[in-house]
Image (tube, rainbow, N blue to C red):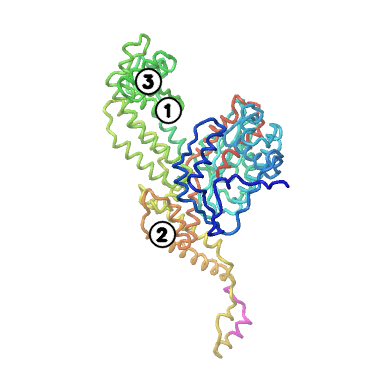
């Protein structure tokens, strides 16, 4: 008779004769013998870590309680489950993850053909077969684009007001694109930003052509009646195009500030005239030219850069590289001068031992560089704060500009050139933003500031401008109340009075036979009564808002409107209308840097339609 298979565990354990539902280890000496036998046949040919003392120790805790039936053994995976093709749902998840990786990391579509990437995916799951480059471009990316677009369209359909930003850029292949972004509050009053499109421009950038392109984009996204304003740079063609649309245009505050600083740094002298003139303006140009020459030398000389780094290490100072500026960007000039100040000591020491090193600044010129940094720093701070996309920025333009002018005016440069730059900066900034508080040409800045619970009227330099903005805001609140109010039914005169005296009845019977000469006033009086009611309600709401405590200057105003929405009603709606407008067109410009990585030398043959979809997914998948 065949002997039934017996588990090896019973070589070390046995049933307790006193209690059948318990098991126990074998006696210590017997267990030690068993362990020695196991050591003798150790297949690894290494000393066993088990000892007699260990066996005895385990024996002291040898009783194991068995409660209920033994647990069921888990089913072992079969080869069929491990090596068969994954289900379609899993394949779809893998494909979507690959497409999202390509879009978010700005990888070329050909990455799925790269041997290294294929080996990695095969190691992670050998059952999954990567989609082809053609399938990704023709099916998977369009499918993900369509689903993401539908999601954004659904969100936009539930919002009341939106604002747009737009800008034009040129790709590596000299193809022009226009990018449009949208900004709005969702149902939970969260500020949202999405890239709507990056469209290839097929014709000259005339106002008529750009107007047609923008019209098509707005219609495609079904936001015709929701666009409050469009923020762009001050290019004549784009301004004229938006005017043809009948939509309010807001000039980008960052562009205006950039032009102010550039003009302050610009000289009327030609490059050839610099050496023959000796004015503060020329000295300023000479200094900028000298800084560029120094940085350029170290950028093009490996030996000089290495010696500079070694000197920095010797002085126990941070090892920093010099930074070259770009002529069209004043903030890069500021960065260049800041870096020169940081490496001043090692730079001066190294320059004495380098044969071809350009002339270093004199002590007075170093002081002028310090004056430049001192004066330009507030402009950089203002640009950064106005370029945020996480919080409302339009309402901060007036108070920040006022703070900028006060800050620059309080700076005390120590050189004549520094004082000259200070004067030019104040002149250029005042010139470009002098009418920022007035209702014309743009009413948006004043209204947005007034409706910001952090500022209200406190940020205005002119009480007249603040009062003008108040009147316009109250009118808009009244219009909002009237639009949202239910229709009123005009009651007949006989319904308004329940009982009539005999004299009134007799007068009423006679009046029916007479012509009513006051009919022409009924409609007018009814309209005026309604307007008076809406206006008085608007005034009450605004007064209630102004009487509330000011919000902390660094708090988020959106939290205030979330908490006060029920109390302030229509005033809250008007405030959110202006809060969704960005102060700059930077959101559109940020797309350019990403687009430069997408339309790169590795994939310069991307079709414009695929460029649009990839930029769209890159910007919106994270939302």
Residue 124 appears in which quarter of the rendering?
top right
Label of residue 291 in the image: 3
Task: Judge from the rendering whether residue 609 lies leftward or rightward of residue 341; answer left or right.
Answer: right
Q: Can residue 90 be seen in this view?
A: yes
Task: Judge from the rendering whether residue 440 lies leftward or rightward of residue 93; answer left or right.
Answer: left
Between discs 1 and 2, the one toward the N terminus: 1
Residue 220 appears in which quarter of the rendering?
top right
Q: Where is residue 413 in the image (x, y as percent from the top left)?
A: 28, 30
Q: Residues within 10 Å of mark 3 (few under 14, many from 20)?
A: many
Spatial distance from mark 1 to mark 3, Cα to Cα?
12 Å
* Of 108 and 462, the residue lying toward us: 108
Residue furthest bottom as drawn: 502
Q: How crowded is mark 2: few (under 14 residues within 10 Å), some or many (20 or more)?
A: some
In this figure, which residue is indicated by the disc labeled 2?
A: 545
Task: Tell me if label 2 and label 3 are in contact, CB under 8 Å.
Answer: no
The residue that appears at 59% across and 67% down in the rendered structure is: 487
Q: Decide: is 150 above or below 474.
A: above
Secondary element under disc 2, as helix, strand or loop, is helix
The residue that appears at 44% across and 15% down in the rendered structure is: 300
Q: Position of residue 544 (x, y in %)?
A: 40, 62
Say if the magenta span includes residue 542. no
In this figure, which residue is indicated by the disc labeled 1?
A: 332
Tell me the mark number nearer the camera, choosing from 2 and 3. 3
Q: Decide: is 262 above or below 12.
A: above
Q: Position of residue 492 (x, y in %)?
A: 60, 77
* Of 352 and 249, the residue lying toward us: 352
Secondary element under disc 1, as helix, strand or loop, is helix
Q: What stretch is highlighted in magenta?
A: 508-518
């Amino acid at each position: 008779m065949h002997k039934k298979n017996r588990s090896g565990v019973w070589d070390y354990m046995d049933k307790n004769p006193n209690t059948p539902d318990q098991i126990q280890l074998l006696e210590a000496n017997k267990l030690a013998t068993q362990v020695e036998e196991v050591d003798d046949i150790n297949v690894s040919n290494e000393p066993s870590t088990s000892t007699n003392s260990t066996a005895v120790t385990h024996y002291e805790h040898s009783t194991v309680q068995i409660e209920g039936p033994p647990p069921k053994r888990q089913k072992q995976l079969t080869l069929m489950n491990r090596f068969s093709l994954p289900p379609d749902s899993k394949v779809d998840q893998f494909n979507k993850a690959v497409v999202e990786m390509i879009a978010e990391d700005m990888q070329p579509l050909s990455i799925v053909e790269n041997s290294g990437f294929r080996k990695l995916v095969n190691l992670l799951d050998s059952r999954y077969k990567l989609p082809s480059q053609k399938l990704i471009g023709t099916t998977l990316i369009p499918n993900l684009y369509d689903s993401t677009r539908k999601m954004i369209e659904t969100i936009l359909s539930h919002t009341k007001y939106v604002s747009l930003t737009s800008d034009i850029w040129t790709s590596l292949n000299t193809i022009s694109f226009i990018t449009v972004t949208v900004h709005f509050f969702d149902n939970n009053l969260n500020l949202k930003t999405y890239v709507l499109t990056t469209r290839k421009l097929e014709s000259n950038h005339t106002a008529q052509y750009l107007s047609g392109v923008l019209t098509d984009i707005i219609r495609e996204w079904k936001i015709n009646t929701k666009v409050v304003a469009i923020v762009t740079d001050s290019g004549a063609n784009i301004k004229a195009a938006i005017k043809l649309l009948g939509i309010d245009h807001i000039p980008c505050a960052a562009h205006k500030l950039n032009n102010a600083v550039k003009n302050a740094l610009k000289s009327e002298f030609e490059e050839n005239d610099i050496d023959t003139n000796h004015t503060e303006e020329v000295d300023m140009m000479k200094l900028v030219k000298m800084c560029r020459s120094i940085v350029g030398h170290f950028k093009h000389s490996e030996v000089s850069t290495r010696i500079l780094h070694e000197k920095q290490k010797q002085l126990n100072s941070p090892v920093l590289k010099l930074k070259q500026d770009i002529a069209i960007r004043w903030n890069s000039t500021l960065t260049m001068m800041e870096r020169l100040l940081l490496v001043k000591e090692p730079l001066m020491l190294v320059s004495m031992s380098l044969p071809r090193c350009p002339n270093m600044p004199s002590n007075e010129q170093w002081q002028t560089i310090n004056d430049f940094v001192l004066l330009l720093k507030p402009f950089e701070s203002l640009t950064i704060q106005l370029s945020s996309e996480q919080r409302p920025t339009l309402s901060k333009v007036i108070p920040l500009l006022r703070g900028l002018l006060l800050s620059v005016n309080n700076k005390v440069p120590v050189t004549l050139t520094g004082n000259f730059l200070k004067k030019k900066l104040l002149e250029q900034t005042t010139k470009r933003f002098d009418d920022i508080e007035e209702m014309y040409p743009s009413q948006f800045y004043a209204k947005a500031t007034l409706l910001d619970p952090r500022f209200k009227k406190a940020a205005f330099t002119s009480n007249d401008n603040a009062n003008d903005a108040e009147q316009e805001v109250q009118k808009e609140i009244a219009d909002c109340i009237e639009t949202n109010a239910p229709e009123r039914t005009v009651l007949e005169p006989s319904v308004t009075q329940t009982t009539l005296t005999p004299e009134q009845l007799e007068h009423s019977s006679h009046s029916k036979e007479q012509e009513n000469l006051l009919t022409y006033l009924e409609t007018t009086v009814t309209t005026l009564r309604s307007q008076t009611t809406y206006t008085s309600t608007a005034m009450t709401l605004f007064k209630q808002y102004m009487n509330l405590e000011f919000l902390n200057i660094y708090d988020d105003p959106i939290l205030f409107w979330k908490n006060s929405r029920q109390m302030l009603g229509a005033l809250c709606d008007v405030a959110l209308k202006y809060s969704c407008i960005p102060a700059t067109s930077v959101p559109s410009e940020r797309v350019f840097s990403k687009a430069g990585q997408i339309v790169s030398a590795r994939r310069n043959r991307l079709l414009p339609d695929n460029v649009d979809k990839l930029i769209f997914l890159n910007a919106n998948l994270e939302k």
